[in-house]
Image: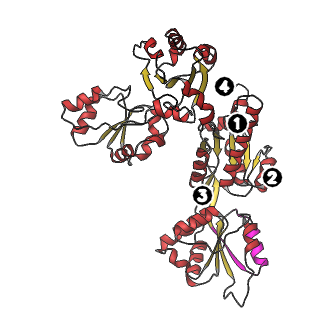
């Protein structure tokens, strides 16, 4: 099976289907481990250098064995030995094509291989080549396995008649956030690659199509391309934020700083659920997705479902909480149209009216460390609040040593703080982020807490939501990139500005 060029999202549908059914997955290289998300639980994972006879026997016994190969298994990747072993053992085999680097890496680099001239030639430098014959190629020449001999290949192409001004691009880490491309010409290859630090896998692209990269580059020009971004949240809360960061080209690292646990005394929640069912409340207000989760789990414990909310009015503090309720089968009656916070909810909450509201009680299932803002505001509006501890938030265990070192040593380009508690807990379990790291906060209160810990706040969301925070960091990254280009400099990630950081031009 072709595993594709590097980006795990470029796996084919057929590939994902077979991985989901596989009994054994043979990794072609360590990077392929990311594709195991498509495999079923309990699948056996082995390395490519494991004995071929054992794998063939497993297939002979009825198991489905999937052998992952880089790129496309039929392109510069010998599978003849495996195919011959299967045929000899009378084991059926299938070859699943994959997206080859020859097209995908060029696309991610903004180089259309067959647009200007309808000829596209792919060669393997690991095999003996007559470079003079390739020099006559009027279209795009893509060279695999040639990075170690790039300069001599360039000279051979010039000797074969190729003009020394012919554009050349060298790209490594293709289709991943490690992608790194240098544009040069055949005559300048030696000077331009001298300090580039390229390693395989890399592609050399020769031809006029390289000149279109400036207009068509879309991947390496993403606002947070290659940025390593720390997301100090709980696993459940960070998924959508991480997906948004990936869309901006970032590499998010989820580090739990808060662990959500049940309340020490569950009796309070038991009474609240009973009151909810028996008509004790007019409103239920949810201030977090975790509160929705806690109530939902209690419902399941008692054999209840969303129908128990019939006749109740439901409020949600923000979009994330609203989504959690909708997934539960409950559409909120009240959602702040402005600031998504306790203050925003109170600003739009209707005052208690004894003529219209038969009951004046509001159920607030919340965290044990919640502020009193919502209770005070609703009380002032004439409501009686049952403030119930639905879950506890406790500090998570410290992250692994390499993460702690990256936080303190400037290995992260940005850190996104979504609450004051994430600031306190991250500093408590891992230390203060390095001063080159961009500090982004969700709102003024979180900014104040960050400054109390001696952190410089660089970015603040225009509204208190995780999505708005990610967008604000992307805008910051785009402005930094534009400023560098306007000054004639090479755009650099924040982590590249720390002392001793590796320097290379993009």
Q: Earlier in the sequence, mark 2 or mark 3?
A: 3
Span shown in magenta: 369-389
Quarter of the picture containing the N terminus is top left
- The local secondary structure at tag 3 comes to strand
Q: Earlier in the sequence, mark 3 or mark 1?
A: 3
- Is the residue marked by circle 3 packed among few (<14), some (14-19), or many (20+) residues within 10 Å? some
The disc placed on residue 505 is 4
- Cα separation, mark 2 vs mark 3, equals 24 Å
- The local secondary structure at tag 4 comes to loop
Q: Residue at x 61, y 21 (%)?
A: 184
Residue that mark 3 sits on: 260
- 302, above or below 129, in the image: below
Residue that mark 1 sits on: 408
Q: Nearer the viewer, mark 2 or mark 3?
A: 2
Q: Position of residue 87 (x, y in %)?
A: 21, 31
Q: Position of residue 458 (x, y in %)?
A: 77, 44
Q: Is residue 434 visible?
A: no
Q: Earlier in the sequence, mark 1 or mark 4?
A: 1
Between 169 and 78, the one lying in front of the other is: 169
Question: Is there a contact, CB below 8 Å, between mark 4 and mark 3?
Answer: no
Question: Is there a contact, CB below 8 Å, between mark 2 and mark 3?
Answer: no
Residue that mark 2 sits on: 448
- Cα separation, mark 3 vs mark 1, equals 26 Å
- Cα separation, mark 1 vs mark 4, equals 25 Å
- 112, above or below 207, in the image: below
């Amino acid at each position: 099976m072709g595993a594709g060029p590097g980006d795990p999202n470029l796996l084919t549908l057929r590939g994902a289907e077979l991985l989901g059914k596989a009994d054994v997955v043979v990794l072609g290289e360590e990077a392929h481990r990311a594709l195991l998300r498509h495999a079923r639980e309990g699948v056996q994972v082995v390395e490519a250098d494991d004995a071929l006879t054992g794998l063939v026997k497993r297939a002979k016994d009825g198991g489905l064995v999937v052998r992952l190969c880089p790129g496309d298994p039929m392109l510069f990747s010998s599978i003849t030995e495996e195919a011959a072993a299967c045929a000899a053992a009378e084991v059926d085999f299938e070859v699943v094509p994959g997206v080859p680097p020859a097209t995908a890496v060029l696309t991610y680099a903004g180089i259309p291989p067959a647009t200007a001239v309808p000829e596209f030639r792919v060669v393997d430098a690991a095999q003996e080549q007559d470079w003079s014959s390739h020099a006559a190629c009027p279209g795009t020449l893509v060279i695999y396995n040639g990075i170690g001999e790039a300069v001599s290949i360039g000279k051979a192409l010039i000797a074969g008649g190729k003009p020394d001004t012919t554009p050349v691009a060298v790209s490594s880490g293709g289709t991943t956030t490690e992608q790194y491309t240098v544009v040069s010409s055949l005559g300048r290859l030696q000077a331009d690659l001298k300090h580039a630090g390229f390693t395989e896998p890399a592609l050399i692209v020769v031809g006029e199509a390289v000149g279109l990269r400036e207009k068509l580059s879309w991947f390496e020009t993403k606002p947070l391309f290659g940025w390593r971004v720390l997301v100090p949240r709980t696993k459940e809360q960070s998924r959508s934020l991480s997906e948004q960061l990936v869309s901006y080209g970032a590499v998010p690292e989820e580090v739990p700083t808060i662990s959500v646990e049940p309340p020490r005394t569950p009796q309070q929640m038991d009474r609240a659920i009973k009151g909810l069912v028996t008509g004790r409340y007019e409103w239920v207000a949810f201030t977090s997705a975790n509160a929705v989760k806690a109530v939902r789990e209690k419902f399941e414990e008692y054999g209840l479902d969303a129908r128990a909310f019939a006749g109740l009015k439901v409020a949600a503090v923000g979009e994330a909480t609203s989504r959690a309720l909708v997934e539960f089968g409950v559409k909120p009656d009240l959602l702040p149209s402005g600031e998504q916070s306790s203050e925003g909810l109170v600003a739009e909450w209707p005052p208690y009216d004894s003529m219209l509201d038969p009951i004046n009680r509001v159920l607030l299932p919340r965290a044990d460390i919640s502020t009193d803002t919502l209770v005070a505001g609703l009380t002032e509006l004439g409501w009686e609040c049952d403030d119930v501890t639905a879950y506890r938030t406790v500090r998570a265990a410290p992250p692994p040593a390499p993460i702690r070192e990256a936080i303190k040593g400037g290995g992260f380009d940005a850190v996104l703080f979504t609450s004051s508690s994430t600031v306190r807990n991250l500093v408590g379990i891992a230390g203060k982020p390095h001063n080159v790291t961009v500090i982004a906060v969700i709102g003024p209160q979180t900014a104040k807490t960050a400054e109390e810990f001696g952190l410089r706040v660089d970015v603040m969301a225009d509204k208190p939501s995780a999505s708005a925070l990610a967008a604000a960091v992307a805008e910051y990254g785009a402005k930094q990139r534009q400023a560098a280009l306007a000054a004639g400099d090479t755009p650099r990630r924040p982590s590249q500005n720390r002392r001793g950081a590796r320097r290379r031009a993009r």
